């Protein structure tokens, strides 16, 4: 099968499916779910067809002309890294679609949900498969738009609307920064094509604009992946339906920023700025997210903060800058997607079957839903880094890299301790998730009687948990070839030797893992009740810090500031607004003219050739214009007559320069406008010079205002005259006008080029209009 067709099909199918789902009736939930599953599975099959070529080290791509004149073409590509992410988007998308079929209420407009989900899937694939960085930003913003629609799907819920608005505001603003950063990156490398950019690492790192470009790109990546200080939007987005959280906030949306950092790692990493900014944000997110997750009372809130922590772990690994750390980052990205998606879906089942996600009301659910409890406990153990599960392997690689980087910079000495502390936190919140939900006395006063979910609803969790087990037990035979393919596409010749063996002997990373597991268990046993009794559902030290209130206060301040600015510059003060616009335009034009070296060097030579009679005509026109301005306030008729004199001189000028057609047109315009002005003057109230401000201060302000207006008017007039003179005396570059001058008489039979253009092209224009109307 043609590779180009496969790539295009992977992008088009989700959008086509979204359009079809949007047209389905509200009750067509089964067909909409089947359509979404079929498209996700079909996309996975397309990716599988390309696996032999990509595993051999090829980068499969297709080019479609978009804006070739400025170097922008639609390019879709798949290499090892993008193939892995595409498989995550499609594979977990199929499982989430199956899960959503049983989670969503029959009262909900389910086809609309699947329409948004498929459109988001297509946008994520567009980000991953883009071979042009401007094209990548377009799909990047589409993910923000469709994630907004998905988070706000239950629009009757105020929290859902607020969370969606916060997510859109933060990620949308980050997308604008990313756009500017990508434009700067394209200018640095001389191309917007990703293949050219990825081969220009030294050029990018040594360029003077490297730091601002890096900052702008990092803002875009950090906002999308909920990294400090932009992490606050993710917990607020938990008001979305659980299938949305399982898909967007484990394997897709929040992984877009991680994908971008991994993609640009070869050309942007290796500098002190990269280490400080990326590593610092990752460490802060890891510690803040892991610590805050311990105290959450909402199941999805706990998982949201743990997601911030795990994403921080990945970003920290990328920030370390070593090839082995990049390997660990890619590996943990895959592992996190599997166990976190399964945990979100398990939390959704608990909410669906009990009617609550509040950990303070849940307990003893193991006896009511043993299968779901077992699956959730295995996934939570993988999240905590328990041996023989996939999370243990990548977390041990993280600890090994933290130890390896504990020399060199002074701050690095704290890396192993902070990494162990974060692992310690993850054990505590994983234990709290398990113990508080599934063990203890039977729950009382739940909205619904707890029971097992339908088997088809549990199937996606079972598949993901099975992957966690298989990868954790035999990683080399399962994830090994795929991980190697993704790593080599990023690192190339810098790919290090690494081992996915479960047992590396007794070493320091194993000791730190054991310390975190044992220490976290002991602390939860000793302080678990106090943690559960926390009244705020937030860390004790940060209970006063409410991200939602801070965001709303910030937005309110921006809104009030905008209103104040509008009140100052708005329609009620048009005169001051026009002054600012005109003065700004004059200053900008003057700066451009001065920077271009444009002057009036040829002024004396040109002025010597002016006919005295022609000059006298324009002196008369200038006097008429000044007289019209002076008489306009109290003697409107005289002003109109003098303004007509200026127009009449313009007509004579066209005749003087052998353009009778323009002179006739100008004369007709002057007659019509004069008649219209005279008709309008009839309805205006009479102005009297006797009516003057009685207040002396008001009279002074009026004179100052008129003086300013006079100065601006004179400046504008001189500026326009100067621009006209420069344009008319500057030699024109080679343009298409030469073609018309050569061909007007020989091909069209006319010496007046303007007339030939009007007759020929207006004839074609009229023919087109007749064709359309006919």
Image: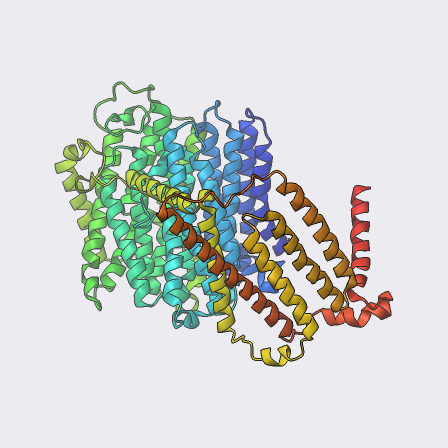
Q: Name the image colouring.
A: rainbow
In this picture, residue 181 sits left or right of residue 22: left
User: Residue 428 versus residue 547: which sits nearer the camera?
Assistant: 547
Residue 187, percent across and down?
48, 67
User: Residue 638 versus residue 577: which sits nearer the camera?
Assistant: 638
* Residue at far front of view: 690
Q: Residue at x 12, y 37 (%)?
A: 526
Q: Residue at x 64, y 62 (%)?
A: 621
* Residue 138 visible in this rendered orientation of the protein: yes
Residue 363, percent across and down?
25, 26
In this picture, residue 506 sits left or right of residue 471: left
* Residue at far left of view: 526
Q: Residue at x 44, y 50 (%)?
A: 576
Residue 46, percent across and down?
57, 49
* Residue 393 visible in this rendered orientation of the protein: no
User: Residue 303 versus residue 80: which sits nearer the camera?
Assistant: 303
Q: Looking at the figure, which quarter contains the C terminus?
A: top right
Residue 570, percent across and down?
45, 44
In this picture, residue 546 sits left or right of residue 625: left
User: Residue 564 versus residue 551: which sits nearer the camera?
Assistant: 564
Number of residue marks: 0
Q: Quadrant of residue 430?
A: top left
């Amino acid at each position: 099968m043609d590779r180009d067709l496969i790539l295009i099909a992977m992008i088009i199918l989700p959008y086509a499916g979204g359009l079809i789902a949007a047209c389905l009736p509200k009750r067509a939930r089964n067909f909409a779910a089947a359509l979404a599953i079929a498209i996700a599975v079909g996309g996975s099959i397309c990716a599988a067809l390309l696996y032999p070529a990509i595993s051999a080290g090829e980068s499969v791509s297709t080019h479609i002309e978009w804006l070739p004149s400025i170097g922008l073409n639609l390019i879709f590509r798949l290499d090892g890294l993008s193939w892995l992410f595409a498989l995550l988007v499609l594979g977990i998308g199929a499982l989430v679609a199956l899960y959503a079929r049983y989670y969503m209420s029959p009262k909900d407009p389910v086809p609309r949900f699947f329409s948004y989900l498929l459109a988001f899937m297509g946008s994520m694939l567009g980000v991953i498969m883009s071979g042009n960085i401007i094209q990548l930003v377009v799909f990047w913003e589409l993910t923000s738009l469709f994630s907004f629609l998905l988070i706000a799907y239950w629009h009757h819920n105020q929290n859902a609307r607020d969370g969606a608005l916060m997510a859109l505001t933060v990620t949308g603003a980050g997308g604008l920064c990313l756009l500017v950063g990508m434009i700067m990156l394209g200018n640095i490398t001389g191309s917007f094509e990703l293949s050219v950019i990825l081969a220009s690492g030294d050029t990018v790192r040594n360029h003077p604009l490297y730091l601002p470009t890096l900052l702008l790109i990092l803002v875009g990546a950090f906002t999308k992946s909920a990294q400090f200080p932009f992490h606050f939007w993710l917990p607020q987005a938990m008001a979305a339906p659980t299938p949305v959280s399982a898909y967007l906030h484990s394997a897709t949306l929040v992984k877009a920023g991680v994908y971008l950092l991994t993609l640009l790692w070869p050309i942007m990493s290796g500098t002190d700025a990269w280490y400080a900014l990326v590593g610092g944000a990752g460490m802060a997110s890891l510690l803040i997210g892991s610590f805050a997750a311990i105290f959450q009372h909402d199941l999805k809130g706990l998982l949201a903060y743990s997601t911030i922590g795990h994403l921080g772990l990945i970003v920290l690994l990328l920030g370390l800058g070593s090839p082995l750390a990049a390997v660990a980052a890619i590996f943990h990205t895959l592992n996190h997607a599997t166990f976190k998606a399964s945990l979100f879906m398990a939390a959704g089942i608990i909410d669906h079957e009990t009617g609550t996600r509040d950990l303070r009301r849940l307990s003893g659910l193991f006896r009511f839903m043993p299968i779901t409890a077992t699956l959730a406990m295995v996934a939570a153990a993988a999240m905590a880094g328990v041996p023989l599960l996939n999370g243990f392997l990548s977390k041990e690689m993280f600890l090994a890299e933290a130890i390896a980087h504990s020399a060199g910079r002074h701050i690095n000495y704290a890396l192993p301790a902070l990494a162990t502390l974060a692992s310690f936190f993850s054990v505590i919140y994983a234990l709290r998730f398990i113990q508080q939900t599934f063990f203890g006395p039977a729950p009382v006063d739940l909205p619904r009687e707890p029971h097992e979910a339908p088997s088809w609803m549990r199937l996606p969790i079972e598949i993901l948990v099975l992957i966690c087990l298989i990868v954790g037990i035999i990683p080399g035979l399962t994830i090994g070839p795929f991980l190697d393919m993704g790593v080599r596409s990023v690192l190339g010749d810098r790919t290090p030797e690494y081992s996915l063996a479960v047992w590396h002997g007794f070493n320091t990373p194993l000791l730190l893992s054991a310390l975190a597991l044992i220490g976290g268990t002991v602390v939860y046993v000793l302080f678990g009740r106090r943690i559960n009794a926390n009244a705020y559902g937030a860390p004790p030290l940060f209970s006063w810090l409410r991200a939602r209130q801070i965001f709303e206060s910030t937005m309110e301040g921006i809104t009030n500031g905008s209103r104040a600015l509008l009140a100052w510059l708005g329609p009620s003060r048009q005169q001051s607004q026009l002054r600012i616009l005109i003065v700004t335009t004059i200053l900008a034009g003057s700066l451009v003219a001065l920077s271009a070296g444009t002057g009036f060097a040829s002024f004396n030579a040109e002025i010597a050739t002016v006919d005295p009679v022609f000059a006298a005509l324009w002196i008369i026109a200038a006097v008429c214009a000044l007289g019209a301005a002076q008489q306009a306030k109290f003697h409107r008729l005289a002003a109109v007559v003098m303004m007509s004199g200026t127009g009449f001189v313009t007509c004579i000028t066209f005749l003087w320069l052998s353009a009778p057609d323009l002179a006739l047109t100008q004369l007709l315009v002057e007659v019509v406008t004069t008649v219209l002005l005279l008709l309008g003057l009839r309805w205006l109230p009479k102005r009297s010079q006797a009516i003057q401000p009685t207040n002396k201060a008001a009279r002074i302000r009026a004179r100052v205002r008129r003086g300013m207006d006079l100065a601006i008017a004179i400046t504008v007039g001189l500026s326009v005259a100067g621009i006209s003179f420069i344009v008319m005396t500057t030699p024109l570059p080679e343009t298409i006008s030469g073609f018309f001058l050569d061909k007007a008489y020989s091909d069209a039979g006319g010496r007046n080029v303007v007339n030939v253009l009007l007759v020929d092209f207006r004839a074609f224009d009229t023919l087109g209009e007749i064709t359309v109307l006919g």
